[in-house]
Image (cartoon, grey):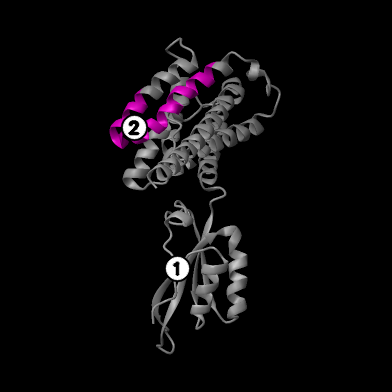
Amino acid sequence: MGPERDGASMKGFAREHGKLLLFTLIGNTMLAFAVCAFVVPQGYMLGGAGGIALGLQAVLPLRLSVLTAMINSALFLLGWGCLGWRFAARSLLSTVVYPVILAVFETLPVDTLFAGEDKLLCAVYTALLMGCGIGLVVREGGSTGGMDIPPCILLQKKGIPLGKSLLFFDGLILLLQILSKGMDGMLYSLLIVALTSAAVDYTAVSGEQKVEIFIISELYEQIRTEILNNQDAGVTLLDIETGYLGEKSKAILSVVYAKKYPELRDAVLKIDPRAFLVTSDVKNVNGVGYTLSRAEHAPKIGPKKA
């Protein structure tokens, strides 16, 4: 029993960290490509550690990748101090990998790939690449390092949404660049910051969207059985009292992936066409069936006691 459990733990560990490694590499490659292919040749101002590095280039004759590595290292230490070694270990990979990938792209002629393209279209592609890159890393529990770390600190300590805090910090960094570079390209850069923020929030929950369903029906026992046995979802029974007749009853609360909702709704209405359903969007769920395996952690379901 012990060796089997250890083997399962090792497989889970490898799977979890393998996904983190893969998406961290993909996300940082998207970020570095966006900077070298669009931001630098188009002369956009940039938020984040890259924006600080671009601003410092005006006074320090160093390559962008070198300045970015210095800034990321300082912010990595900040993350370590505020969020602990576990978080720091997750952002360490990006802290090292991103400047390296950026240095590789600096040696390649990617800056000429989109030289003749419309500047507004390039700004949109820049935001999509950067936002999706950050989102891919964040959704696996990692960090892209740099100025991604302060928003993660605010998210954990204060509950401030990642996209909103990224927007604030990026706006502040853009303001500092405007003071040193002037207003050229400001509107494009503000568009990049806004679209990047939206892309981060969307990518971080993409494919994970869930809905919460609240069901009131006299046939709640049949509906409960249907959801548990045929819909592969959990249920919670809540004691309620109807407002009109004042009758005691039970309501059903369940959370399912959005793509499964139509099937569950139809199954409920097939049992009770008069069932009262309230549905709302849910961005994140932790627990058995979502972040924990139902097969490993769910209790065995038996007949209800009389």
Magenta segment includes 93: yes
Residue at 46 percent of width and 73 percent of height:
252
Q: Is residue 142 above or below residue 227?
A: above
Report x, y in % for residue 184.
55, 25
Residue at 62 percent of width and 65 percent of height:
262
Secondary structure, mark 2, is helix
Residue at 58 percent of width and 27 percent of height:
34
Report x, y in % for residue 298.
43, 60
Q: Can residue 172 be seen in this snapshot?
A: no
Q: Residue furthest top?
A: 61
Q: Nearer the viewer, mark 1 or mark 2?
A: 1
- Tally the marks: 2
* Magenta extent: 74-103
**Amino acid type indicated by mark 1:** Ile
Q: Which residue is mark 2?
A: 79
Q: In front: 248, or 20?
A: 20
Report x, y in % for residue 211.
52, 61
**Amino acid type indicated by mark 2:** Gly
Magenta segment includes 118: no
Q: Which residue is mark 1?
A: 301
The local crowd at label 2, few if under 14, some if 14 to 19, many if 20 or more residues have their Cα within 10 Å, is: many
Q: Is residue 35 above or below residue 108?
A: below
